[in-house]
Amino acid sequence: MDVSSEDLVPLLEPGEIRARVAELGAEITREYRGRDLVLVCVLRAAVVFFADLIREIPLPFRCVFARAASYGGGTESSGQVELDLDVREPLEGRHVLVVEDIVDTGRTARAILDAIEAHRPASLALCALLDKPSRREVDVPLRWRGFEVPDRFVVGYGIDFDDRFRDRPGVWMLP
Ligand code: 5GP
Ligand code: MG
């Protein structure tokens, strides 16, 4: 598919994302105050959300980066999740919050949660900017979500189509 930025259809404005991220940060801060918190950024598409979210969490925490890939160059999940978790940061006995861009079928989030669960954290929760509940195939406990979105392929705010449009402010739908 050949898409140019003029074809993109607006879905979420930068201002509404900023406001929602601040709310999520405040809720997460209340939940984890006084706990040994580890925030896991799921590369690559969650990186912009993660960068904004952590600045709304005025607590001491550690960051871990995990890489997950399930999409090839297209808009359909391959169903196979490739996962690369940085295990140098010990997770055992710590409170782990996974930060994702989108929970779609739930396969990626499930794979990440299972991989982290094996490290025996004190608690494990998931936060995603976007949730596509109509697409869910695998049940995942989504503790915090920014926005529910329709079954459309979206880009912007770090989320790409073949590495394009990550830099777009706001979230957009492909035509
Ligand atoms: P799942 O494993 O839940 O089906 O898919 C999760 C991952 O697929 C997300 O973290 C995201 O990277 C990617 N994904 C799902 N929906 C979209 C979308 O609309 N646009 C883009 N660019 N990626 C998506
Ligand atoms: Mg992702």
Image (cartoon, rainbow, N blue to C red):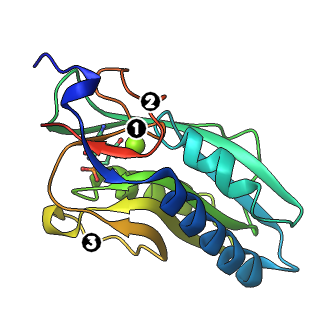
Q: Which residue is mark 3?
A: 139
The amino acid marked with disc number 2 is Arg
- Within 10 Å of disc 2 (Cα), the crowding (few <14, some 14-19, many 20+) is many
- Label 3 lies in ligand 1 vicinity (Cβ under 8 Å): no
Q: Is residue 33 left or right of residue 66?
A: right
Query: Which label lies toward us, 1 or 3?
Result: 1
Of callouts 2 and 3, which one flags the residue occurring earlier in the amino acid sequence?
A: 3
From this view, report whether residue 71 is shown above or below residue 30: above
The quarter of the picture where the C terminus appears is top left
Q: Which residue is mark 1?
A: 156
From this view, report whether residue 80 is shown above or below residue 105: above
x then y, percent, for residue 150: 18, 61
Q: Are marks 2 and 3 in contact (CB under 8 Å)?
A: no
- Please name the residue shown 75% across and 83% down the image: 30
- Please name the residue shown 18% across and 39% down the image: 77
The residues tagged by marks 1 and 2 sit, at their Cα atoms, a distance apart of 5 Å
Q: Quadrant of residue 21?
A: bottom right
